[in-house]
Amino acid sequence: MARKKKVSTTSSLNDVIGIGNIFNNEKANFIAGLTLLALAVYFIISFISYFSTGALDQSLIEHPLPGEIMNTKRAFSNKCGSLGAYSAYFFIKECFGLAAFIIPAFILITAVKLMRVYNLRLGKWFLCSTLLMIWMSVTFAKFLEPFFVECHFNPGGGHGQYMCQWTENLIGSPGLTAILGLTAIVFLTYVSTETIMLIRKILNPTKYFTDKVKFVISNHTKESINADTDEEIETIEDPEVFDDPVAQIVNFDDNVKTDAPAQESAYNVENDPIVGNADKNEKKRGQANNDEDFEIEKATEEDKANNKTLVNIETGDMSPYDPKRDLENYHYPTLDLLKKYETDGRPFIDMEEQTANKNRIIEVLRNFGVEISSIKATVGPTITLYEITPAQGVRISKIRNLEDDIALSLSALGIRIIAPIPGKGTIGIEVPNAKANIVSMESILNSKKFQESKMDLPCAIGKTITNEVFMFDLAKIPHLLVAGATGQGKSVGLNAIITSLLYKKHPAEMKIVLIDPKKVEFSIYGPIANHFLAKVPDEDSDPIITDVKKVVNTLNSLCKEMDTRYDLLKLAGTRNIKEYNQKFIARQLNPEKGHRYMPYIVVIIDEFGDLIMTAGKEIELPIARIAQLARAVGIHMIIATQRPTTSIITGNIKANFPGRVAFKVSAMIDSRTILDRPGANQLIGRGDMLFLNGSEPERVQCAFVDTPEVDRINRYISQQQGYVSPFELPEPDIEGGDGIGGAANVDLQHLDPLFEDAARLIVLNQSGSTSLIQRKFSIGYNRAGRLMDQLEKAGIVGAAMGSKPREVLILDEVSLDSLICTMRNSPQ
Ligand SMILES: Nc1ncnc2c1ncn2[C@@H]1O[C@H](COP(=O)(O)OP(=O)(O)OP(=O)(O)O)[C@@H](O)[C@H]1O
């Protein structure tokens, strides 16, 4: 209860004074940061100057003359004038001595934080700086004083000197030395857990040495590995800092979990010397492991070096192609654009509620003759999972049938029974918490799991019931169907997916196609059109597609892009986009032959149901085609609907969307349509969802990202340099055309302004290549294609020859000039 009160007071104070707004204002922050930077530099100069001028200025400061503080007669010698002299005198002499330099250092840190140069935790820095300054001032006063006898100030300042004398009077010099040593160790331990390891090593160097020897023997037999495992875990776990409560739960299952990877990794090392990407544990063991495996590991390294040389030979002298070069100064959005909530990552555990629920579950089960041998609760952000182990001889179906009775006794909505929990010999009962916690997007993106993820299209969408960050790789899923009744969190879920992609991907690596028949959901992404959005070129069209006709066009265009990408993949002898891009980066593919770096394309369709209702098969067929084939070429779809009926989620769609997200639906039949099983009808709404990709759905609390947050991220991106226009998708085929539009449809009366320049370029290079025009004039593929059609119609180049450059029919510039002259004069 006390907690509740605290929250409301803080927020109301913020509301009244408007502090939040000031700190959220980027310009104000930047200017404040700049001012602090100047102040820090000023302090540093005045402090340094104090060393040589402090003695001269001291009498002026201690016995000031009237009016002298303004330094009108330039009596102060400090380089920073009277103010500099006063501040240096106060901070160095009166307060902290040499340790006073920590003050401008901290101001500097605050400045770079405000200017968003570095994202630092100011609270922690403040605490550390203050403690360090106090400690240093006493230490300097104690140990450096003999070297500063002649000096005009004490190296520990007034504070250090006083504290040192006072403590020495109380506990003597050895006592003070011991306290200083101890506080130093405590401080270092607070700053980094490495200190513990270091001290252990110092205190027991022989154990460390013996551990190494043990590992050498351990790789021989499985028994010896097992025997050593415990000690090994101790060594490995210490330096790891788990920032996630999940770690505690994993540890709970102790030896069963930790033993298995240990054996596996031992097996890998023995049998597969080329495996260089074994897990962290194995690496650490490899480092500790010395003699027997030593030669094998050396051989592995040599193999790797050889591979590198091969690549170098193939790429020649050219440096690898950098797709990000056009926007090399692009900054990924920072975490401070997202909102923090007080209860983030720390679900509030109400022991009273937990005990009452546990007792009621046991009671209901007992009333129906079901005895259980143990019960365990895992408290998640919105749901608590009670895992029960039934007594011997109890039928699982009996517990399953008690779902409604348990719900009744707990008087709670959204109870779900998982019987049995896959992979465990227990039955799970999910019960909503009385007080649900919001899972902020910030807490998800600020996790190690997300930040260290190597996924191609990482989507962090929320937290599981065990408080673990839940992520999936859209590139692997590869298409996602999102459904749920209105107002249950679909749009927030889609925004969470887009946000996590924006935080991890560079504009060169990913493009998004946004289709929004409701017209209001995605309009917020308009500002990042030139960075991240893709569309069919159409002068006056909005990059966010809202019109059904344009949706059909766009989907057909995506089909065409897919086909083109497949052709390029075939030409390059690669099987998927990843291999293709790797080859392109290594400059093994020639752009003259139409090769280009392929960004991933994520197509997001909101209210897919509306589209199917209005355009039916015209929409369904290209979606099914893309869903069936586009995985390998990096085109992935996310479709969302609030009408999960079989007429909308047809068999065709279902078969091609293996990833499913279900928010709360009103009827069990809807849940069956989305997930092929009940469950979504028992969710509690507000982002409570089931994620299915495989056999069993997982319950996840979706992260909450609201419109101002998305707006801030988009503004952050849009303020940076972007491409000149959104990514151009190919124009969909017009019947009878030979690609872009077909020369047959070209009207020579309305030529492209670049026509003459393009013709000259083609004739001079004697190469009818579309990509040459594209690169030379920095234009999109479609415009270059249209130019090529016009050149064909004008008789300058021949017909298209697949991916090869066209034949150039005009041999020199003189013939070209006369042709252009004729064209100008012709009445046609
Ligand atoms: N993850 C979440 N955590 C907390 N609250 C949420 C979450 N997701 C949604 N909500 C709450 O539910 C409301 C409705 O969410 P949202 O707009 O995403 O629903 P929707 O399913 O898209 O509805 P519609 O289909 O009508 O557009 C939000 O305004 C918010 O208050």
Image (spheres, rainbow, N blue to C red):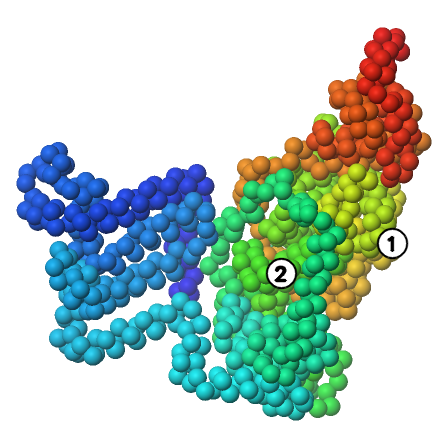
Q: Quadrant of residue 707?
A: top right
Dot 1 lies on which element? helix
Residue 203 in view: yes
Residue at the spot 53% in from the left edge and 58% down from the top edge: 446
Quarter the N terminus occupies: bottom left
Q: Quadrant of residue 450?
A: bottom right
Residue 159 percent location from the top left of the image: 18, 62
Nearer to the camera, 580 or 455: 580
Residue at the spot 33% in from the left edge and 53% down from the top edge: 105
Q: Residues within 10 Å of mark 2 (few under 14, many from 20)?
A: some
Q: Residues within 10 Å of mark 1 (few under 14, many from 20)?
A: some
Circle 1: residue type: Asn
Position above or below: 793 against 408: above
Residue 302 percent location from the top left of the image: 67, 68
- Is tag 1's residue or tag 2's residue first in the polypeptide sequence? 2
Residue 427 in view: no
Q: Is residue 432 left or right of residue 743?
A: left
Residue at the spot 56% in from the left edge and 63% down from the top edge: 448
Q: Is residue 50 left or right of residue 250?
A: left
Q: Is residue 385 left or right of residue 773?
A: left
Q: Quadrant of residue 525?
A: top right
Dot 2 lies on which element? loop
Q: Name the residue tied to disc 2.
A: 453
Count of numbered tags? 2
Position above or below: 383 against 31: below
Q: Name the residue tied to disc 1.
A: 652
Circle 2: residue type: Ser
Nearer to the camera, 626 or 467: 626
Query: What is the CA distance from the residue labelled 1 to the residue labelled 2?
Result: 33 Å
Q: Nearer the viewer, mark 1 or mark 2?
A: 2
Residue at the spot 57% in from the left edge and 76% down from the top edge: 287
Position above or below: 567 against 96: above
